[in-house]
Amino acid sequence: MSATSPRTVGPGVVTGVIALSGVVVSLMQTLVVPIIPQLPRLLDAEPSDASWVITATLLAAAVVTPIAGRLGDMYGKRKVLVGSLVSLVAGSVLCAVSDALIPVIVGRVLQGLATGVIPVGISMLRDVLPAERVGGAVALVSASLGVGGAIGLPLSAAIVENADWHVLFWLAAGLGAACLALVVALLPAPPSRAVERFDTVGAIGLAAGLVLLLLPVTKGGDWGWTSGSTLGLFAGGVVVLVLWAAYEVRVAQPLVDLRVTVRRPVLFTNLASILVGFAMYAMSLTLPQLLQSPGATGYGLGQSTLMAGLALAPGGLVMMALSPVSTRITARHGARTSLLIGVAVIGLGYAVGLFLMAEVWQIVVTAVIVSGGVGIAYAAMPALIMDAVPVTETASANGVNALMRSIGTSTSSAVMAAILANMTLRLGPVEVPTENGFRVTYVVAMVAAAVGLLLTLAIPRAVRATGATGATGATATATAPQAPGSAPTDLPSSNTTETR
């Protein structure tokens, strides 16, 4: 038996390596948050230019997820995991040795390109684990996205307060290298299930369309939402994506199989994912600002960046703790029910937060409730996707789902920043968001959760795919992963039963 056989290393080890890699990759999203105010000085750049250190990572992450997923389906998921982690290490080292804007932006792009680890890792679990272990493993790895973001803020703040900012990136490089070594040494290399040509034109078209669409979303606040640059890029993005979709439905081997993507279970899961990503990121943007607002405002809590990060850290632990709960709900009632519960809890968290804004512990309660909902919802989404797509497309389908969450987080960043920037009061020489501004962000997040709930209700109650192993391990007709070399599994309507 091969030393890299999943039975040799054990399902728990495989799951642990992928989950750890997911946590490290998601750390990159919050790694530089504590130094955002200092970036113009540290990099000798204008504030608008320095903001590209954040924007570049978000754009790279959005573009790479569906592409990495497709590459994983075609050429092997372990190879894509290795390549992604190499990109993370290279980008981290580049940032660690740089003091200029352009090299740091390039390094942050390379860090963002590692985001494909999470959707590819989730789909790999379906290939290599026993069916009864897949559901719990998927839930745990899904939770790693939120866990990494939650613990990244206090960790980064502690480093910045006690060491040079370059240490942030040396830490990232070290963690990435450790994950890379574990992946190479311990993860199996399941054979690719599809032998076909990579859709280079589709990849270029999708990347161009996403950049044109998401760039004004992330930079519209700086450029002006009605400026020619913002509106022109929006229009260009829409045109490019329409042309891309027309091309994809005509090509024999598309980057994204849009016919699968528009199936009701996949479509409404992806639409709901946008809203969940929006509501999740609203917490990450709004609560730290409320915690750090000056006490002189009468509502601000006057906390340091480190204390604000520590207040949100329990939420990450709750996400991890609730992942097995989501698995049990899915096994008993289906992933649709898990997603419904998760989205409802997110909305409840923001509703409770409207009345709990006066003390640090109250913010912690809000963060814990919202994070709990996010953990349940994030664990359910890959299960819904993998139960509804052919086994040969699990990585690319998860990549598209991760893209939908990225669109939600990018949109949330723009909307919340616009609200807080336009509802301010002057406190000495500076302007700070008003208490009503924070309340409006809570209400907007509640509305997003409510719309997400309606979209989730539109997902069929159950999807059964003949010959495909579902993500839950309990909902598919097969009881083990499809044997390598067997015929690709498709989901024609005649073989799919939907119970509404």
Image (cartoon, helix red, strand yellow):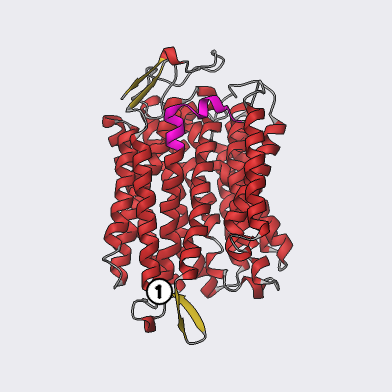
Taking the image as shown, residue 99 lies to the left or right of residue 331, namely right
Q: Amino acid at mark 1?
A: Thr
What is the quadrant of residue 43 in the picture? bottom right
377 inside magenta stretch: no
Q: Is residue 169 visible?
A: yes
Q: Quadrant of residue 364?
A: bottom left
Identify the residue at image location x=57%, y=27%: 257
Q: Which residue is mark 1?
A: 434
Q: Pick the quarter of the image with the C terminus.
A: top left
Q: Main secondary structure of the magenta part?
A: helix
How many other residues sit within 10 Å of disc 1, few (<14), some (14-19) or many (≥20)?
Answer: many
Q: Nearer the viewer, residue 177 or 461?
A: 461
Range of the magenta residues?
Answer: 256-270
Locate residue 324, reporting x and y percent: 32, 40
Indicate the position of residue 89 as horizontal and vertical percent values. 64, 51
Q: Nearer the viewer, residue 73 or 377?
A: 377
